[in-house]
Image (tube, rainbow, N blue to C red):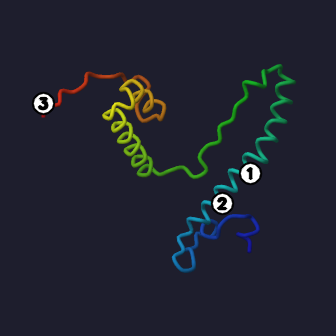
Amino acid sequence: MVSASVSIPATRFLSASPEGMNATGESDLINYIELLQGLQKDVFEPRLKVMDSLLSAHYGLDIKKFEYEWGCIFPESASQKAEREDKHVDWICKLVEAGVLSRESALQNVKDEHILSTEATLGEKPDKTIL
């Protein structure tokens, strides 16, 4: 009952195993994440805008420059991050090989995704005859 009253799934709140046939707890977690994202958008952002207007008026700041980026609700583990990056790089490589994406655009994409350092540059295209 406590878990339901605070809108946190029992699998998360009590570290309990999901119960029922074929229960994984995944749908509970998805609903919880959607609830938190809804709170961020519908409750916290309007309140932050009020604070922003007060601060901008008091300190003479340009309110148009105020931006917020909500962090990930449940950060991924190192292995999940590595797997996601591997899939992304494979996808980018396939697009380059198919001629859909230029090497320059691919490099910029992986820089933007923080997979490579921003100082990374294009190297020479490897000779496929050398193994």
Residue type at the position of mark 3: Ile
Q: Amino acid at mark 1?
A: Leu
Tell me which residue sits at (44%, 47%) in the image. Answer: 81
Q: Position of residue 57 (x, y in %)?
A: 86, 24
Viewport quadrant of the N terminus: bottom right
Residue 131's mark?
none
The residue tagged 1 is 39
Where residue 119 appears, as percent x and y from the top left, is 41, 22
User: Pointer 2: what residue?
Assistant: 32
Mark 1 or mark 3, which is nearer to you?
A: 3
Q: Residue at x 87, y 24 (%)?
A: 58
Q: Residue at x 83, y 19 (%)?
A: 60
The numbered mark, 1 or 3, whose residue comes first in the sequence reads 1
Residue at mark 3: 130
Q: Position of residue 40 (x, y in %)?
A: 72, 47
Q: Residue furthest bottom?
A: 21
17 with respect to 89 (left or right): right
Mark toward the start of the polypeptide (3 vs 2): 2
Which percent across, then down, holds residue 20? 57, 80
In the image, is residue 27 above or below residue 36?
below
Q: Is residue 105 above or below residue 25?
A: above
Camera-side residue: 90 or 94? Answer: 94
